[in-house]
Image (cartoon, rainbow, N blue to C red):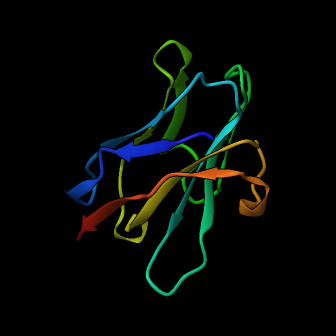
Amino acid sequence: QVQLVESGGGLVQAGGSLRLSCATSGRLWYAMGWFRQAPGQEREFVATIGATAGSTYYADSVKGRFTISRDNAKNTVYLQMNSLKPEDTAVYYCAAGSSSRDRTDYAYWGQGTQVTVSS
């Protein structure tokens, strides 16, 4: 069983930055993804990274502003978020087991971390 724990969320002004972390309970063998869910909205894809960090993909809404990375030695995946906008406000989740944009392809999920961007 893989356990994922997100951290790094918080309140930030528009234009600011945050870095989210996702620590895993074991060795980081899997492709990983970040998703987000705003109130009343479906959970949506944000970014994904391959198992060896060779490939990354982003939602169009965050491309050029967010960067996903991983440190396999620390069993941790990161999401660097720059130039944040109020519409980025959501609970952010990391997920393990796929490099898909489809949330149903992921076997493991963290509990989420709240990101709030004020205007």
53 vs 13, nearest the viewer = 53
User: From this viewpoint, which residue is outermost toward the front?
Assistant: 1
Q: x%, y% of residue 25?
A: 50, 32
Residue 21 vs residue 17, the one in the foreground: 21
Q: Is residue 56 left or right of residue 15?
A: right
Q: Name the spot of residue 52 as percent of width and height, x first.
A: 71, 19
Image side of residue 111 versus residue 63, left or right: left
List x then y, in percent, for residue 90.
41, 68
Which corner quadrant holds the N terminus? top right
Q: Quadrant of the C terminus?
A: bottom left
Side of 64 where 84 appears, left or right: left
Quarter of the view holding residue 51: top right
Kindly identify the residue that appears in the image at 61 percent across and 25 percent down. Answer: 28
Q: Residue at x 33, y 62 (%)?
A: 114
Residue 20: percent from left, percent from top? 38, 42
Give the camera-side residue of 109 and 47: 109
- At x 58% / y 60%, what residue is drawn? 61
